[in-house]
Amino acid sequence: MEVTNRPKHSLAKHGKDSVSLFIGDKKSLYFITSVSSVLIILLALKNHYLGYSLLAYSLVSFVFSAGFHALALHKGSRITIHTNIVVTLLIVSIFLTIYYLGVETVYWVYPISISLIFILTIKSAIVFNTIIMGVVSGFSFLGMKIEEASRVSVSYLLTVLISFAILMHINKLKQRLVDESIRDPMTGAYNRRQLSINLENCLAQKKRNNINSAILMIDIDHFKHINDSFGHGVGDEVIKHLVNIINEYSREVDLLFRVGGEEFILLMRDTNIDDALHVADMLTGAIKTKQIIVNHPVTVSIGVCASFDNLSKDKWIKYADTALYNAKNSGRNQVQLYNYLVESAVIN
């Protein structure tokens, strides 16, 4: 098995899709959509009364397509109207509004452009806002003096750039909050709640697709003695060094969890037991040879347990802990495998 240095990674990806701003409680999004739909319908009726039937029809088409799309998403239906079609209808309405009612109506594009930035993906928001800017600038330079048209174009560009900057800042804050809620602040390892979620996912994969996984329960030997002899500051540094070594010898798909003061679980997804044992042996060897504390050996004991049929996440952890206990009782600084068949035979 190839082992390479791995960068830190996140359990959830954020930032690519700005609609993730509304993950969780979507009431605010639906409220905005409802109010906007009512206002646009009223404008459509007004334009129809004034004789601008094409504009009225385009506004109504946009409202109904957007409403159908939002309702389908809310109910989890697979039949939706593609977002790009909905936004295209909106841009057509913008074009017809300026064409029929004059260049003075360009102020409508400002709230629309901001909304697109916070609802669409980044790529789509850039594309559609570029199109809108082309429409606005074209009508502005045709119907206004050059100075006024330039101010409209520049102000629109600034509105878009500032909105994107705000969106990026919000996404960074969101990612920081997510990381703080799922990671141990000192080591960057994931917490117990994330362990439970990921163990259940691995066991589900084992049941559905027979994809094997393994967990390594890793504990620093004589850690209390290290704290008592060198202080808790040195103890914290030992833990940080341990995490760095584990990250160095694990794969991108592996996840590290802190489950106790000096106790960690490395979840190796989609791997066989031989590869898991190989990594465990490399970890014990690497940690022993590293001079984490000068003239004082630091070692770890590791209990390994593979996933198997009819296994619960709690028993999986318990079995790995049993293997770790055996490693401790056998002299520490070693790897022990939990053998389900052998343990079952002893119990029976």
Image (cartoon, rainbow, N blue to C red):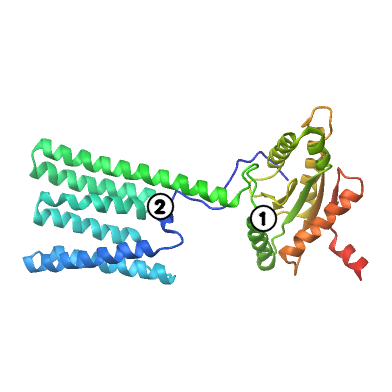
Viewer-closest of 182 and 229 = 229
Q: Which circle's residue, 2 or 1, is located before the other in the chain?
A: 2
Q: Residue at x 35, y 66 (%)?
A: 70
Q: Name the kind of residue labelled 1 in the image.
A: Arg
Q: Residue at x 9, y 52 (%)?
A: 102
Instruction: Identify whether 28 is placed above or below 161.
Output: below
Q: Which residue matches tag 1? A: 192
Q: Residues within 10 Å of mark 2 (few under 14, many from 20)?
A: many
Q: Name the kind of residue labelled 2 in the image.
A: Ser
Disc 2 versus disc 1: nearer the observer: 1
Q: Quadrant of the C terminus?
A: bottom right
Percent of width and height locating residue 295:
84, 27
| Relative horizontal placement of residue 265, taking residue 299 as reference (left or right) | left
Q: Residue at x 73, y 50 (%)?
A: 260
Q: Residue at x 69, y 68 (%)?
A: 207
Percent of width and height locating residue 190:
64, 50
Viewer-closest of 254 and 212 = 254
Q: Secondary structure at mark 1?
A: helix
Q: Which residue matches tag 2? A: 18
To which quarter of the image does residue 206 belong?
bottom right
- For this orientation, the residue located farthest to the top is 294
Percent of width and height locating residue 191:
65, 52
